[in-house]
Amino acid sequence: MKLVSTTYKVIALRYFEIAEHKVYSDWATEMLIAGFDSENLGRLAGVEKTFNEDALSELVRKVLSEFKVELDDESLAIQCFIRLRIQQLLDNMIELETGLFSFNKACLKTDYDEELMPFYLLYHAYISLKEEEIQFY
């Protein structure tokens, strides 16, 4: 059985160690609706924002392991992350500065990955314009 289409979100967030409770919970719910089942998946579907981030991270790791989702492919994780953040920005789920800042952090974490570099530069151009009303990017 093929995993649900929103699995890319979980791959991205888990790889970059970002705790977005609602994304994880929504994904787990979609998986359950699609016919996947495990005790940990059911627990993940019920997590709320108050759930401990370390416990959430461990629970997500267990669920991904149960369904044999690999997290070792940095290139795939980066592509998933870019897709996730752009979709969140287009859907107005996150503010522009928040989205750009997350690209900045991801670029630093991946030692200036070439796929993330344009977003890194865009973040710094945005901040320059915001603070100094001039930018040179």
Image (cartoon, helix red, strand yellow):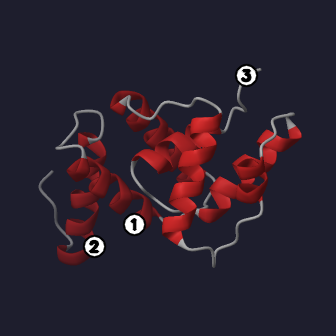
To which residue does mark 3 refer? 2
Q: Nearer the viewer, mark 1 or mark 3?
A: 3
Residue 41 drawn at (x, y percent): 73, 48
Distance from Cα at disc 1 to Cα at disc 3: 35 Å
Depth order, front residue of 106/64: 64
Query: Do the residues under discs 3 and 2 have CB atoms within 8 angstroms?
Result: no
Image quarter (top left, top right, bottom left or bottom right) of the N terminus? top right
Distance from Cα at disc 1 to Cα at disc 2: 10 Å
Q: Quadrant of residue 97?
A: bottom left
Q: Say few, some or many: other residues with alpha carbon within 10 Å of mark 2 (under 14 / 14 to 19 / 20 or more).
A: few
Q: Nearer the viewer, mark 1 or mark 2?
A: 1
Q: Secondary structure at mark 3?
A: loop
Q: How many marks?
A: 3
To which residue does mark 1 refer? 97
At horizontal 83% and vertical 43% (from top left) the residue drawn is 32
Residue 70 drawn at (x, y percent): 49, 30
Q: Secondary structure at mark 1?
A: helix
Q: Amino acid at mark 2?
A: Lys
Depth order, front residue of 70/79: 70
To which residue does mark 2 refer? 130
Closer to the chain start, of discs 1 and 3, is 3
Q: Quadrant of residue 4?
A: top right
Depth order, front residue of 59/49: 59
Query: Do the residues under discs 1 and 2 have CB atoms within 8 angstroms?
Result: yes
